[in-house]
Image (spheres, coloured by chain):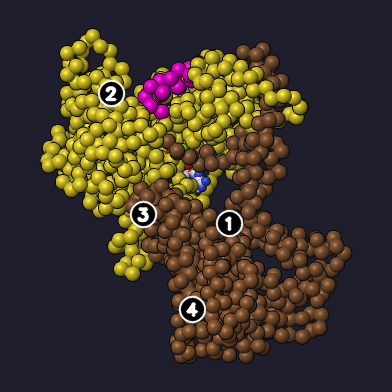
Chain colours: A brown, B yellow
């Protein structure tokens, strides 16, 4: 039977040739996911520092820029402007939400590449709701956000349904739906009277997420009610996943589909539920960008990439609610520090390199196993040579 | 001074919440077969993992062939000539036997053409020497469990191991395969190898081992000469009390039919009909045993009963209601419990906690969920505490233990606890006592009989003829997907059941008995 004793899960000699011992230290920090993430982030920054040194700049500039983005303190000029903090949180908001989208599906064992499409659906619906719903303060914006989430939930749910009904790969389905969402959004948005090839008429104030007090508090930053939606979503993620029977069923399905099925959990239903909830998170991100950043509706000219960046956020956040929240803040920090670095003579690409490296390092944990598998195959060829020389020996022995 | 292959001195290894090994001593003589016996969770696998370098002991020392050894990883172990065969094989499914065996040995880079033929010759040589029958060229995916295990043993021999650790090798084997393995072990011994054998089957220890070290709750109880010890003595040393090997039960009192299977046909994984027009009835208050050689449709039948496979023909009725196409949850709600054959695949979510696994079938209902769908973790943990106490499930951190950190036998106990606690009208159990120690088996058997006495129907699938004979009231033999015959357990002897398992009709056996040798 497939009985794995404790021992059986360790590496065995067949897999570990001497050259692989260098990887042993990876096992240590692969042990805890949270520890792994922290280490990985530190490694990313370390690598960034080294690269800056290598190109002959002062890495202090990077840290000063990061500090300023995080606290508003400008060390070089000795002034404090809290607006930077607001911008940081505002940029992080959609990243957190698309990270939650990716993470939620991942916990149920699904790879949701479709957050981008779900985000677009949410964004488009929010824009329509802003332009066409009655302009009642508070009511309109709440409705717009809710409709965006609901529409994106359906968009995501379709994928779950395709998976459950036809066993269609969610990866292929979501990628296709991303493009469908993109072109559909362009087409319907351009059809709005008064829209040109890149924007719609201005959205009414009653449909905007602007929070006057937040702007005052942050010295006129872009921070708006969307940030509270993100915080509420992080809590909702955690609550649903850890404290409800729905989350229980999703987690069980994600970790062992066969055992979940044998226990009466409907894995098909889990697929639809998890993809719908994942879609709702991404749709919220779309609504927040639509109703919080620009005063007008946009005709998309390309992907905004929030959905794709959500994959990285979820990876670093280990697909837990709070982990994703923190990871979203981290990626948001890198994004908001970019212009500040440039002004300090640090190439802005450094932030991309750091976030890229962080993702690579996180993926290493999974990649580590793949690497081992690959080494096995590679070793086989070499091995045969050895086997040949040993055959002679073996025949003498036998 | 004696000639020891392995001396483990005062080995201590702690995991969070448990002292898995507490100053354990194990001395294995050169060239002997040394059994390690102990209750589930006594620390056997942990001790072997320390010897094989998977865990480093917190304290204690190891001597190999009289020399101090520091074994930090399996490479060190391999260099010292130690090989280990795990319960869960680690073979690459789409590689051939030979490819698997040569895979991952120390690469010495010298360039040359790939000479698999040479390796194949060597594997064939080893396989002949030790009676490990496998074709070096077959693919792993085409091999049965027994053959895969032989490949694992060959792999250690190819690497010139002369100390072999076998961790519960027989738990996955059918009785014939066990006999074959016993012969292989004898061969290994006669070729001068040292074998450390972990098993819960006292009969196997008597048959194969020279000496036996007994562990209890992480401590060494002692080492005995097997020839001088009776099975009862070994059992008592291990659990600390006398163990009852007989199942005490009153004659059955069957009532109304609970499970009625009629003309059931189920397609197997290879597209053939694994179950063919099978009919069988299990009534309230009786235990029906399904005896048969592995691969005769038992697994498919159980999966169809549990709702995991769709039958292509026939009907299944539970308490008179047609459940042929009912969902798994409907079956559970209507009173079916199922102990699956493959505990890791169908029984547990290894990444979840013990208490969550114990509520895996009932978490959606009160008291574990309230009306709004929120989980009540207090109730879930309390349920676990109760079952842990009742079934003596040993887990380091109690309800919070991740099930993957539990010993194999305790994982099995957890599944049985969960299923019996459903107090079902129909209990379908496949290989319920695989990997369990004798004390646990005694308790599980008692509980199954108690369920029967409460008027439940029990269908037991087991490859262990002993277990079927001891526990069941009625025995149905399955061969090539159909029931060949049924007998009351009272009228059955092993030869008779064995003959039925081989496909002989009961009437035919009665007329020819004596002339025919029953062989399962
Ligand atoms: N990696 C681990 N983390 C935490 N606890 C562990 C770990 N490995 C083993 N244990 C605990 O150590 C104890 C000994 O486990 P071990 O697997 O050695 O038992 P065993 O004698 O092999 O039992 P079985 O007969 O059931 O296989 C058990 O209580 C088990 O829960
Ligand atoms: Mg064990």
Residue mark closest to the camera, 4 vs 2: 4
Residue interval drawn in magenta: B173-188
Look at the numbered disc 1 and give the secondary structure of its residue: helix
Q: Are marks 4 and 2 on the same chain?
A: no
* Residue underneath mark 3: A265
First in residue order: circle 4 vs circle 1: 1
Residue A145: which numbered mark, if any? Answer: 4
Comparing A76 with A223, the one in front is A223
Can you identify the residue that label 1 sits on? A33
Q: Quadrant of residue A57?
A: bottom right
Is B274 part of what is drawn in magenta? Answer: no
Alpha carbon separation for disc pair 1 and 2: 50 Å
Q: Are marks 4 and 1 in contact (CB under 8 Å)?
A: no
Can see residue B238?
A: no
Check the image and report above or below for B493 versus A206.
above
Instruction: Tell which tag, 3 or 1, sits nearer the viewer.
Output: 3
Q: Magenta includes B187?
A: yes
| Mark 1 or 2: the one toward you | 2
| Residue A115 image point, x, y percent | 54, 65
Q: Is mark 3 within 8 Å of ligand 1?
A: no
- Host chain of mark 4: A
Residue beneath disc 2: B501
Q: Residue under mark 3: which chain is it in?
A: A
- Tell me the subunit letter for badge 2: B
């Amino acid at each position: 039977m497939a009985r794995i004793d404790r021992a059986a899960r360790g590496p065995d000699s067949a897999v570990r040739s001497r050259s692989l011992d260098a990887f042993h230290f990876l096992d240590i920090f692969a042990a805890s996911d949270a520890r792994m993430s922290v280490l990985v982030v530190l490694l990313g920054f370390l690598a960034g520092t080294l690269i800056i040194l290598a190109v002959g700049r002062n890495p202090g500039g990077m840290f000063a820029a990061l500090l300023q983005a995080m606290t508003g303190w400008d060390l070089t000029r000795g002034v404090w402007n809290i607006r930077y903090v607001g911008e940081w949180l505002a940029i992080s908001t959609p990243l957190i939400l698309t990270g939650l989208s990716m993470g939620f599906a991942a916990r149920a064992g699904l790879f949701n590449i479709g957050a981008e499409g779900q985000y677009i659906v949410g964004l488009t619906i929010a824009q329509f709701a802003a332009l066409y719903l009655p302009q009642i303060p508070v009511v309109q914006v709440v409705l717009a956000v809710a409709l965006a989430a609901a529409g994106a939930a359906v968009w995501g749910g379709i994928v779950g349904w395709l998976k459950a009904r036809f066993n269609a790969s969610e990866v292929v389905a979501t990628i296709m739906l991303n493009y469908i969402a993109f072109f559909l959004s362009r087409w319907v948005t351009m059809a709005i009277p008064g829209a040109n090839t890149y924007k719609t008429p201005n959205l009414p104030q009653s449909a905007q997420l602007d929070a006057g007090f937040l702007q005052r508090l942050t010295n006129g930053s872009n921070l708006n009610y969307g940030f509270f939606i993100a915080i509420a979503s992080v809590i909702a993620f955690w609550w649903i996943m850890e404290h409800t029977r729905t989350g229980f069923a999703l987690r069980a399905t994600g970790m062992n589909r066969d055992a979940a099925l044998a226990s009466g959990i409907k894995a098909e239903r889990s697929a639809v539920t998890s993809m719908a909830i994942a879609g709702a998170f991404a749709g919220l991100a779309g609504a927040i960008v639509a109703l919080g950043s620009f005063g007008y509706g946009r005709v998309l000219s390309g992907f905004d990439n929030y959905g794709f960046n959500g994959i990285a956020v979820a990876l670093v956040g280990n697909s837990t609610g709070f982990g994703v929240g923190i990871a979203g803040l981290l990626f948001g920090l890198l994004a908001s520090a970019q212009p500040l670095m440039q002004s300090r003579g640090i190439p802005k690409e450094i932030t991309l390199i750091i976030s890229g490296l962080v993702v690579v390092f996180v993926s290493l944990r999974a990649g580590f196993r793949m690497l081992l598998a690959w080494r096995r195959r590679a070793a086989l060829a070499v091995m045969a040579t050895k086997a040949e020389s040993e055959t002679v020996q073996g025949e003498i022995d036998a | 001074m004696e000639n020891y292959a392995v001396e483990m001195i005062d080995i201590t290894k702690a995991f969070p919440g448990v002292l898995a090994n507490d100053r354990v001593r194990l001395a294995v003589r050169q060239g002997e077969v040394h059994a390690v016996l102990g209750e589930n969770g006594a620390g056997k696998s942990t001790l072997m993992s320390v010897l094989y370098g998977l865990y480093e002991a917190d304290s204690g020392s190891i001597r190999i062939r009289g020399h101090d050894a520091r074994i930090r990883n399996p490479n060190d172990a391999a260099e010292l000539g130690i090989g280990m065969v795990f319960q869960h094989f680690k073979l690459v499914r789409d590689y051939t036997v030979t490819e698997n065996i040569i895979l991952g040995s120390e690469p010495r880079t010298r360039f040359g053409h790939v000479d698999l033929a040479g390796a194949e010759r060597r594997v064939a040589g080893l396989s002949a020497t030790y009676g490990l029958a496998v074709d070096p060229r077959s693919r792993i995916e085409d091999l049965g469990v027994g053959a895969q295990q032989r490949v694992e043993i060959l792999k250690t021999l190819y690497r010139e191991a002369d100390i072999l650790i076998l961790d519960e090798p027989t738990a996955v084997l059918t009785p014939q395969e066990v006999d074959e393995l016993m012969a292989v072990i004898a061969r290994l011994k006669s070729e001068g190898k040292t074998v450390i054998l972990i098993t819960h089957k006292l009969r196997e220890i008597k048959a194969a081992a020279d000496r036996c070290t007994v562990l209890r709750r992480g401590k060494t109880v002692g080492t005995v000469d097997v020839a001088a010890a009776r099975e009862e003595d070994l059992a008592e040393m291990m659990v600390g009390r006398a163990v009852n090997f007989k199942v005490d039960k009153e004659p059955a009192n069957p009532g109304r039919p609970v499970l009625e299977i009629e003309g059931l046909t189920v397609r197997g994984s290879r597209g053939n009909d694994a179950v063919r027009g099978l009919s069988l009835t299990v009534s309230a208050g009786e235990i029906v045993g399904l005896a048969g050689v592995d691969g005769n449709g038992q697994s498919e039948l159980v999966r169809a009963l549990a709702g995991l496979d769709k039958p292509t023909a026939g009907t299944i009725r539970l308490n008179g209601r047609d459940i042929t196409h009912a969902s798994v949850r409907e079956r559970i709600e209507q009173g079916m419990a199922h102990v699956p054959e493959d505990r890791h695949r169908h029984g547990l979510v290894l990444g979840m906690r013990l208490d969550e696994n114990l509520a895996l079938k009932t978490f959606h209902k009160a008291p574990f969920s309230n009306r709004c769908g929120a989980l009540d973790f207090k109730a879930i943990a309390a349920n676990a505490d109760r079952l842990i106490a009742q079934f003596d499930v040993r887990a380091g951190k109690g309800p919070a233990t991740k099930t993957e950190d539990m010993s194999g036998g305790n994982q099995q106990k957890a599944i049985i606890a969960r299923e019996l606690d459903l107090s079902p009208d129909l209990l379908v159990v496949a290989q319920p006592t695989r990997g369990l120690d004798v004390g646990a088996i005694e308790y599980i058997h008692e509980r199954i009989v108690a369920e029967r006495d409460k008027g439940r129907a029990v269908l037991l699938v087991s490859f262990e003829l002993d277990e079927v004979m001891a526990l069941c009231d009625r025995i149905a033999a399955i061969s090539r997907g159909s029931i060949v015959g049924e007998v009351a357990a009272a009228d059955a002897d092993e030869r008779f059941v064995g003959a039925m398992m081989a496909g002989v009709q009961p009437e035919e056996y009665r007329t020819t008995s004596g002339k025919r040798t029953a062989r399962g």
